[in-house]
Amino acid sequence: MRLVGLVVVSHSRGLAEGVAELAREMGVHKVRVEAAGGDADGGLGTSVDLIAEAVRAADDGAGVVLLADLGGAVLTAQTFVADAETEVELADAPLVEGAVAAASTAATGADLAAVVAAAHGAYGFRKL
């Protein structure tokens, strides 16, 4: 079964890798979750090339959902989506909660729209 993949886009490589690690656990290691954090030199920033590489690795043929942290990461992800040749969508969601919701939903075999909706729904998660 093909599953929707995820890419975590962050200004920080460490943050992207940490969120991706958590999302892989929540996706019971069935979902391809890749990190695209930092700039091409390993510093803080974002990179369209790193996003493209991560999308290729995450794409199982069912589409890929991008989750981004802050303004510049969102803009870089939007730039990638505008020119993407694969089925990819940027989710408007809180990074950690959205990645967890998306991964657990993707693991069920849900389609791209359902995975994006799950990520969007993470805005409703309350902590207190």
Image (cartoon, grey):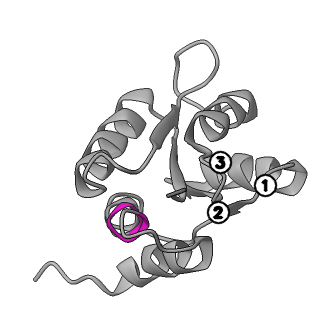
Disc nearest the viewer among 2 and 3:
2
| Residue 72: image tag | 3
Q: Could you tell me residue 59's position as x and y percent?
A: 62, 45
Q: Could you tell me residue 17's position as x and y percent?
A: 37, 34
**Residue type of the residue flagged with mark 3:** Gly
Residue 118 among magenta residues:
no
**Residue type of the residue flagged with mark 1:** Val
**Residues rendered magenta in the picture:** 102-106
Residue at mark 2 to residue at mark 3: CA–CA distance = 13 Å
Asked if the residue at tag 1 contacts the one at tag 3, i.e. Cβ–Cβ closer than 8 Å, the answer is: no
Q: Could you tell me residue 39's position as x and y percent?
A: 61, 24
Outermost residue toward the top in this view: 41
The residue carrying pointer 2 sits among few (fewer than 14), some (14 to 19) or many (20 or more) residues within 10 Å by Cα, namely: some
**Residue type of the residue flagged with mark 2:** Leu
**1 sits left or right of 105 in the view:** right
Residue at mark 3 to residue at mark 1: CA–CA distance = 14 Å
Please name the predominant secondary structure of the magenta segment in the image. helix
Asked if the residue at tag 1 contacts the one at tag 2, i.e. Cβ–Cβ closer than 8 Å, the answer is: yes
Q: At x 29% / y 45%, what residue is drawn?
A: 29
Residue 116 against residue 34 in the figure, above or below: below
Residue 75 against residue 55 in the figure, above or below: below
The residue carrying pointer 1 sits among few (fewer than 14), some (14 to 19) or many (20 or more) residues within 10 Å by Cα, namely: many
Instruction: Say which residue label 1 marks.
Output: 81
Q: At x 37% / y 78%, what residue is drawn?
A: 122
Instruction: Say which residue label 2 marks.
Output: 90
Residue 128 against residue 10 in the figure, above or below: below
Q: What element carries label 2?
A: strand
Q: Is mark 1 on a helix, strand or loop?
A: helix
